[in-house]
Structures are given as C-alpha cells and as structure tokens.
Amino acid sequence: MATRIEFHKHGDPDVLSAVEFTPAAPAENEVQVENKAIGINYIDTYIRSGLYPPPALPSGLGTEAAGVVSKVGSNVTHIKVGDRVVYAQSGLGAYSSVHNVLADKVAVLPNAISFEQAAASFLKGLTVFYLLRKTYDIKPNEVFLFHAAAGGVGLIACQWAKALGAKLIGTVGSAQKAQRALQAGAWQVINYSEENVVERVKALTDGKKVSVVYDSVGKDTWEISLDCLHRRGLMVSFGNSSGPVTGVNLGILNQKGSLYATRPSLNGYITTREELKEASNELFSLIASGVIKVDVADNQKFALKDAQRAHEALESRATQGSSLLIP
C-alpha cells in the first residue's frame, strides 16, 4: 500500500486528507516513481481552493517530486528502473509516496543534487528559466523588477539574475525577507510595507523605470507593476497569490505607455522532451556548481500526512524559500 493526499471538496487546508491506496501499474509511456521528497507550490493552493479546479473530485494534489524509478512502461526506453529522477509537470497526485508520471516529463537527476534539493527547486527553477530566458531574455546589466523576491521562485530568480550579471530589484514584505533576497543576489530590494514601490523603482533607475516586471502577486500589484514599466515595457503576470487579475481594460496598456502584457505558464514553454532537457540541464548545472543554492529550513519540511499544516504555513506567508513534504 502507498499513501497519498486527496481532497473531496474545495476549501481551506482542512479539506486535505491522507489515504492509503494501491498504485496502478504505469501505462506504456509512464514511469512509476517512489517519491523521496515532494515540492509544495503556491499553485497547489489554487487547485485545492477551486481557483484552478481539477478535472474531477475527489482529486490528488501536486505535480512535483523527486525519487527513484521503480517501474517503467513498455514503451519507455530513455528511463530505467533505479534511475534517480525529478519531475514538475505530472498529472495531479505528486503528494504521494508513489506516483505514475509520463516519461517525457521526467528528468534524470545528477548524483550531485539531492532529492530534497531537486524537489525544492525543479518547478521553481524551470519557472525562472522560462521567465528570464524565454518570456523575456534578460541581458547583463539589465535592471528589472521581480515581486515576492524572498519566495521560492524569487530566491532562485535572485541567484539566476546575479549569474546572468543582471540587476534584479526585488519586492519583499519585511526586513528579514529583504535581507534574504539581498543575500541571494538581488541588486536592490523594496520593502512594500514601508516604501512606495513605484517611487523607489523610479529613484533606483534615475526615473527611467524598467523594461520588464515579473509579477506573481496578481490583483494587489497589477497597476503598481504597470506603473514601474517604461514605454513599451513588458508586464509578465505569472501568479495570483493575492487573487486573480480580473476585469482588465486593455486601454490601460495604451494609457501607461503602449505596454505589453503576457500571462505565461510552464506548460506553454516546456512542452517537449527536448525543451525539458534544455531547461533542466541549465538549472542542474547552476545548482551542481553552487551558483544556485537550494536550502530548505527544517521547519519547512513536513511529513506527507501533514499537508494541511504545510498549506497553512504557505498561505500565511510565514515561509521563505521552498517547502517540502517528506513521505
């Protein structure tokens, strides 16, 4: 028997429960992975709450984990039993001790990277890859704004930006988080609880503002982000931690300087095995070389059965960086 987290209705974290089940054999193009560490991501809370409803209820949760392949489907040739792997684009159900995943969505994990490092960084790292390298190709010395810079995605973005020689201005909600972002490689930080974000961006850029803003906050920062962009700048909205952006009048993009806006997702950028290989190889090389450091605090590692508590911590904004479930 194996254990997984599921929910039968949408709601707060208390809708999550641990159940035992017998894993099905992997389909012909799947592999079965015994998870050793499971990534917790903010999108998981959207699915649980019903903002992004799953195909049906009851439903599993989670798309990211790292572990060891225990079975392979009949058509799988590039992955073998015993391989150390990580994935971030599985069907819902990664909050589980065992999970079946499409083989083309699995990356073989270098020995230099632990299961915990991989599960804490793969989805977030692939996200930073497509944001900084594909949605908008950040150049050396380029100044840009990244909201929630002390979050799981944000801390990787700070480190990646520094590796690119770029100047990331990060927004944070406390002095402690400001210090964390600076340590990770942010060029400057703005504590939005004490400072006006738009005015600080203008001051830091000598009034020029920035060419691109990466915004995972959503409703609360939509207009703030637009006001930080210079003429024909790009607004990249990739999350909704404060709620979704709705009822947008496209005319506002004209009024604020013929701006561009995009709402990208990982699945829109990494759709093939070749694209996954390109992204994961770049991420793995940065982690293995120590350029990107992935550390998970002990108080942000939760037993699988404690998924409720993990979601409560995440939604309270009390966490910094990544959190994990350990089967």
Image (spheres, grey):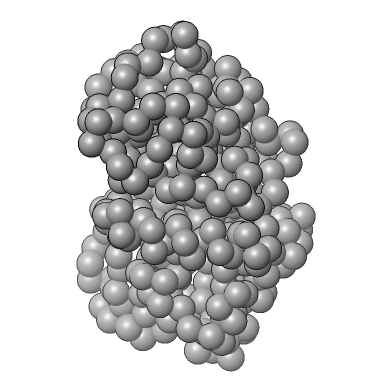
Seen in the image, is 299 located left or right of residue 208? right
Quadrant position of residue 164 = bottom right
* Vertical comparison of 81 with 306: above or below: below
Seen in the image, is 304 located left or right of residue 194? left
Image position, residue 29 (x, y; %):
25, 35
Image position, residue 187 (x, y; %):
66, 76
Residue 55 vs residue 171, the one in the foreground: 55
Residue 9 vs residue 54, the one in the foreground: 54
Q: Residue at x 30, y 42 (%)?
A: 77
Q: In the picture, which quadrant includes the C terminus?
A: top right
Q: Residue at x 58, y 91 (%)?
A: 206
Image position, residue 207 (x, y; %):
54, 89
Q: Residue at x 56, y 87 (%)?
A: 141
* Vertical comparison of 268 with 115: above or below: below
Q: Residue at x 39, y 27 (%)?
A: 71
Q: Is residue 28 visible?
A: yes
Quadrant position of residue 318 = top right
* Vertical comparison of 201 with 78: above or below: below
Image position, residue 44 (x, y; %):
44, 35
Q: Is residue 312 visible?
A: no
